[in-house]
């Protein structure tokens, strides 16, 4: 079957988890909602109910710690306090994204990524994201034996549970499409994060026939 594959690069990235309590925590890769937002920013329009599947994998060179000034209102003293807040930042983030959907929609995304309607970014807007390698590729389902993955990845829970992996993945709940309604609420997807170098000991997965990469498609239904 056909998928749209493209690569993204940004010098720094932070993808704040919504449940950070005493500080800021970041997802190790951008969540699905971030990539969906990028696609529709490139199109220059809002989501109109289209459905498609996404695979996100990639790597970063390091995580460094930055600080920002955080303002907090002290109810007891009725005063505004300024505190240093530690922020983890992913350095030199490179991503490979695959999309599966209707051919007309994939063509629309392909053309938009090659000639976006607006400035593209995936982490706060301070740095533009570089888009490259935009092309349609063939993927096939294959039975695989032992191999180590070359990119960290989000793997949907229903696929992860059919694989034998070592070491075990880390469970995340990621935001995806926004639900209809007055309140800004996302659809949430259960995935496992596999770090680069994780061994897939056996199982059936989709493989990008041109790039030789595993493809970890999450469906939103």
Image (cartoon, rainbow, N blue to C red):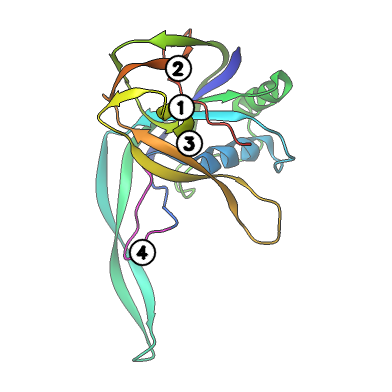
The residue under the point 32% across, 34% down is: 169
Residue 52 lies in quadrant: top right
Q: Which residue is mark 1?
A: 159
Q: On the rendered structure, is 10 left or right of 1?
A: left
Q: Which residue is mark 2?
A: 205
Secondary structure, magenta segment, majority class:
loop
Q: Nearer the viewer, mark 3 or mark 2?
A: 2
- Does dot 3 land on a helix, a strand or a loop? loop
Q: Are marks 1 and 4 in contact (CB under 8 Å)?
A: no
Of mark 1 and mark 4, the one earlier in the sequence is 4
- Spatial distance from mark 3 to mark 1, Cα to Cα? 30 Å
Q: Are marks 2 and 4 in contact (CB under 8 Å)?
A: no
Residue 200, placed above or below residue 54: above
Instruction: Indicate yes or no whether the magenta region holds residue 25.
Output: yes
- Does dot 1 land on a helix, a strand or a loop? helix
Of mark 2 and mark 4, the one earlier in the sequence is 4
Q: Nearer the viewer, residue 208 or 45?
A: 208
Q: Is residue 117 visible?
A: yes
**Residue 21 point in image, percent of width and height:** 36, 64
């Amino acid at each position: 079957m056909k998928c749209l594959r493209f690569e993204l690069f940004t010098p720094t990235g932070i993808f704040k988890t919504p449940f950070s309590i005493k500080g800021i925590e970041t997802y190790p890769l951008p969540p699905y909602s971030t990539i969906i937002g990028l696609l529709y920013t490139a199109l220059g329009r809002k989501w109109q109910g289209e459905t498609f599947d996404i695979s996100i994998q990639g790597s970063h060179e390091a995580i460094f710690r930055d600080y920002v000034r955080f303002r907090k209102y002290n109810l007891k003293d009725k005063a505004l306090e300024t505190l240093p807040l530690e922020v983890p930042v992913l350095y030199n983030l490179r991503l490979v994204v695959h999309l599966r959907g209707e051919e007309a929609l994939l063509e629309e995304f392909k053309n938009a990524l090659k000639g976006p309607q607006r400035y593209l970014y995936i982490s706060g807007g301070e740095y533009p994201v570089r888009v490259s390698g935009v092309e349609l590729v063939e993927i096939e389902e294959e039975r695989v034996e032992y191999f180590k993955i070359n990119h960290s990845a989000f793997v949907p829970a229903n696929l992860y549970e059919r694989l034998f992996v070592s070491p075990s993945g880390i469970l995340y709940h990621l935001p995806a499409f926004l639900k209809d309604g007055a309140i800004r609420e996302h659809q949430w997807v259960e995935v496992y994060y596999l770090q680069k170098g994780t061994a897939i000991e056996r199982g059936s997965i989709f493989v990008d026939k041109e790039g030789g990469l595993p493809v970890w498609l999450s469906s939103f239904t």
